[in-house]
Image (cartoon, grey):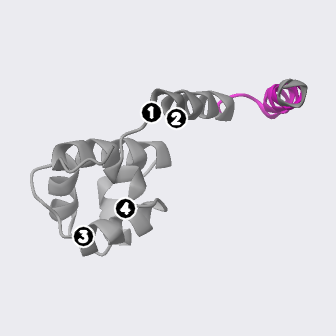
Amino acid sequence: MLVFDMRSVGEKLWAIRKRAGLSQAEVAERANLSDRTYADIERGAINARMETILRICRALYITPDALFTEETPLQTQREDLLRRLDTCPPHAQETALRLLSVYLDSL
């Protein structure tokens, strides 16, 4: 489903930026925007031009789909699992991936 609510887009930008470990100023600089403009977009306080949204997407290494479509519960679960996996030590990640591979091969 497409999302055209700038507040929802701003919330997604906030979440993506936080996952990337970036500050608003860093994203603004990468997108060649003022800190204030980026902060206003992230708060959903202004309607940004598509050109500006595309620059932000490039700065965050995402596609516009990440901002303008709603995630399904399955996508959310997948992202949560990957985030959890990323916090595990390397040997635990390797074990989890081997287990998943064995399970998928059994399907």
Closer to the camera in the image, 37 or 8: 8
Q: Which mark is residue 84?
A: none
In this rendering, position of residue 81 left or right of residue 3: right
Residue 71 % position (x, y): 42, 38
Which residue corresponds to the image point at 71% horizontal and 28% vertical from the top-left?
88
Quadrant for the N terminus in the image: top left
Name the kind of residue labelled 2 in the image. Answer: Gln
Q: Position of residue 8 (x, y in %)?
A: 23, 42
Q: Main secondary structure of the magenta part?
A: helix
Above/below status of 35 relative to 66: below
Label 2 vs 3, first from the N-terminus: 3
- In the image, residue 88 lies in the stretch drawn in magenta: yes
Residue 70 drawn above or below residue 63: above
What residue would you read off at disc 1? Answer: 72
Can you identify the residue that label 3 sits on? 50
Residue 23 visible to an observer of this rendering = no
Q: Which mark is residue 75?
A: 2
Q: Mark 4 or mark 1: which comes first in sequence?
A: 4
The amino acid type, in three-letter code, at marker 4 is Glu
Residue under label 4: 26
- Distance of label 1 from label 3 (alpha carbons): 24 Å
Q: Is residue 92 magenta?
A: yes
Asked whether disc 2 touches disc 1, contact meaning CB atoms under 8 Å apart, the reply is yes
Tell me the distance, in whole angstroms, between the alpha carbons under discs 2 and 4.
27 Å
Residue at position x 37%, y 41% in the image: 15
**Residue range of the region highlighted in magenta in the rendering:** 87-102
Tag count in the figure?
4
Indicate the amino acid at tag 3. Answer: Met
Q: Earlier in the sequence, mark 2 or mark 4?
A: 4
Marks 1 and 3, the one that precedes in the sequence: 3
